[in-house]
Structure formats: structure tokens, C-alpha cells
Amino acid sequence: MFVSSWLRGVARLAMSATQKPRVVFVLGSPGAGKGTQCKNIMKEFGYVHLSAGDLLREERSKPGSEYGELIEQHIRNGTIVPVEITCSLIERAMHKSGGNKFLIDGFPRNKENLEGWTKNMADRVQLEGVLFLDCPEDVSTARCLGRGAKGSGRSDDNPESLKKRFETYVKDTMPIIEHYEKLDLVHRVDSKQSPKHVFQDIKDIFQQFQ
Ligand code: UDP
Ligand code: MG
């Protein structure tokens, strides 16, 4: 009697120790709809949404930020901020949120990001999968330019920065998606459809994660 309840207690403790926070990476071209769809997923499935780009923009805007200038240069150039900065912002935001299911939007974006994540974080979380919002360049560009014209306030929603962001996406981020494809972790959605249609497809995927 006592032994069995003690054993149950031990089993429960072991369970909680092994229940790592769950992570879904959300990747896709600039303007593929990562931010929009992450908000939908957050509402419907109770994930905490952490956008690497938003975390970097927030850090950049902090008065006296040590990395503000460096971050702004990378954002305008469409190049990737050193992983130590991005990964530590993500880690801090995960802790601060107190959540246990995370959508990490727009990360990892290149080989260095992936290596930094693998070294510091991969063992501490359970990667459920990668949501890949697949959108052709013409549609993505039109969306970002539309957003820029409407006053997104982003210093990189202009034709020059967009061209570079796309180059980085094709050259650096696609290989990361291919890496996860080999591990059978990628869930691809055709994201040139309307936001409503895209979310229908996403729901089918996230229902499997529950
Ligand atoms: N960025 C980065 N590392 C990241 C995420 C973003 O360096 O892990 C920088 C990069 O310069 C990128 C910019 O932030 O072009 C904007 O990223 P965001 O994800 O906000 O853009 P999106 O792809 O959603 O349009
Ligand atoms: Mg975004």
C-alpha cells in the first residue's frame, strides 16, 4: 500500500523531470505569413509565440542596448544576427513566459543559428516539428511591400532590403529546412493561399501535436 503510493510519487516526479518544454519552429520566406499564422496558432492551441525578429527589434530599441547598432545593420541588410544574441533572447523569453509550448518564429535561419541552438538549447526542449510556410517570392515580396507601404514601421520592408532578405532565405534558410526534412520533422503548408485557408491546413497539423 505505502510502497505503491510511494512508487506512484516517484513515477510522477520522473515524469515531470522528463517533460521538457515543447517547441515548434516556424520557417518560411519574408512575408510568408509566419507572424499572422503564429497568432492564430497561439489563440487556438495555447502556444507561446516568440518571434526571433520581434525579440531582436525589441532589443535594438532598448535605450543603451549594447547590440542595438549591430542588430539594426543586420536587419537592414537582410543578414543574420550572431546566434549568441538571438539564442539568449529566445531563452530569456522562454523563461519569462512561464509557458511550456513554444512557437519559435523565424529561427533557426542559418547553419550558425542551428549550431548555436543545438549546443545550448536542443537537449533542454522537445522539438515537435517545423512548420514550413511555403510561399513563392513574388507573392511574399508583394505582401512585404504592401505591409511597408501601409506603414509597418519596419526598416526592412523596402525593395532593397527585401531583395537581400530573399537571398539570405534561399541561400541560408532553405538548407535548414532541408536538414529538418531529412529528419522527417517538416510540415509544409502552401502559404500563398488566403490566411484563412492557410490556417485550415495548419490546424490539421497541430491537431496531430496535441
Ligand atoms: N533576424 C536574425 N535572426 C533571426 C531572426 C531574424 O538575424 O533568428 C533578423 C534578420 O536580419 C531578418 C530580420 O531580423 O532579416 C527580420 O526577421 P523577421 O523574422 O522579423 O522577418 P520576416 O521573415 O518575418 O519577414
Ligand atoms: Mg515575422
Image (cartoon, helix red, strand yellow):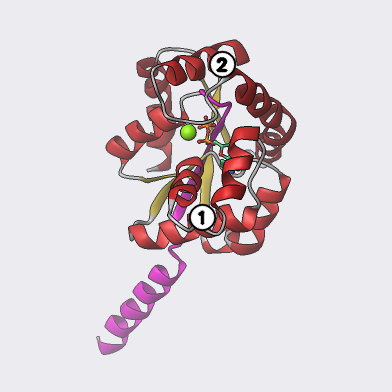
Circle 2 crowding by C-alpha within 10 Å: few under 14, some 14–19, many from 20: many
Residue under circle 2?
141
Please report the residue visible at 65 percent of the width from the left and 25 percent of the height from the top. 166
Instruction: Name the secondary structure under disc 1.
Output: strand
**Relative vertical location of residue 93 with respect to residue 172 in this rendering, above or below:** below
Where residue 74 sits: x, y (%)?
Answer: 63, 41
Spot occupied by residue 26 in the image (x, y as percentages of width and height): 51, 37
How far apart are the alpha carbons under marks 1 and 2? 33 Å
Left or right of residue 72: residue 110: right
Q: Does the residue labelled 2 lie within 8 Å of ligand 1?
A: no
Left or right relative to 11: residue 91 = right
Which residue: 65% across, 42% down? 80
- The quadrant of the rendered image in which ligand 1 is seen is top right
Whether 68 is among the magenta residues is: no
- In this view of the protein, can residue 185 be seen by the observer? no
Q: Which of 117 and 100 is in front in this view?
A: 117
Image quadrant where residue 35 sits: top left
Q: Disc 2 on helix, strand or loop?
A: helix
Q: Which residue is drawn at 66% across and 30% down?
A: 169
Residue 28, percent from left and from top: 57, 29
Q: Is 2 in front, or is 46? A: 46
Q: What residue type is labelled 1?
A: Gln
* Residue 81 locus on image (x, y percent): 63, 47
Specify the quadrant of the image occupied by residue 79.
top right
Q: Which mark, by number, is residue 126?
A: 1
| Residue 6 colored in magenta in the image | yes
Amino acid carrying mark 2 in the image: Thr
